Amino acid sequence: MIKVGIITISDKGSRGERKDLSAEEIKKLIPKLPGQVVSYTIIPDEEAVIVKTIISYADKKRLDLIVTSGGTGLSPRDVTPQATSKVIEYEIPGMAEAMRGESLKKTSFGMLSRGLVGIRGNSLIINLPGSPRAVRENFSTLIPVIPHALDKLRGDPSECGSA
């Protein structure tokens, strides 16, 4: 069972002014991994808070998968990718590209998403957009490869390709 943490990054959500519909979408999809949400929080769009929370989820809680929602656009307060880049050891650009590619099938605005996917320790960190529809579309694109990615991260020596 994959241990999952969800971090919603939203000023309004953290103040209780907006219901967190994006996290609800993530929670609906987690069983397909199969996974279990063991940690969930809503925090403001503050880079230092995002950094601290991701580090806590990866290093202290030792979660397999950390999914963020929100803060991946171009607004001045959208700092999730900057915060994520400060804590990951390396990126997995193909996964982020797959999300943007899927978004572009629906809307040309998909190219504006700056979400990253990367690794910290044994945790896979995925930045998703903040809208419930974009969460569903983007995360669904990655679900088929997440278990394999985590197996590889844990040292699985089997081949990735099929014969």
Image (tube, helix red, strand yellow):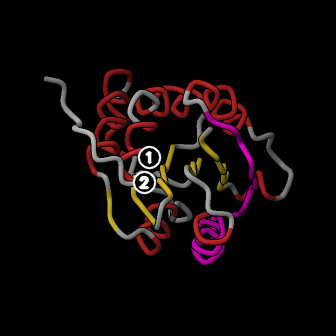
> Where 114 falls versus 105 (above or below)?
below
Are circles 2 and 1 on residues that touch, CB within 8 Å? yes
Q: Which residue is mark 2?
A: 154
Q: Is residue 39 magenta?
A: yes
Image coordinates of residue 4 in percent, x first then y, are 64, 46
Range drawn in magenta: 35-57
Mark identifier at residue 26: none
Q: Which quarter shows the N terminus?
A: top right
Q: Is residue 47 magenta?
A: yes
Q: Disc 1 on helix, strand or loop?
A: helix
**Camera-side mark, 2 or 1:** 2
Report the front residue among 13 and 146. 146
Q: Disc 2 on helix, strand or loop?
A: loop
**Identity of the amino acid at label 1?**
Leu
Q: Quadrant of residue 42?
A: bottom right
Q: Which residue is mark 1?
A: 150
**Identity of the amino acid at label 2?**
Arg
Image coordinates of residue 111 in percent, x first then y, are 31, 40
Evaluate whether residue 143 shows in this view.
yes
Q: Which quarter shows the C terminus?
A: top left
The residue at 31%/52% (across/down) is 92
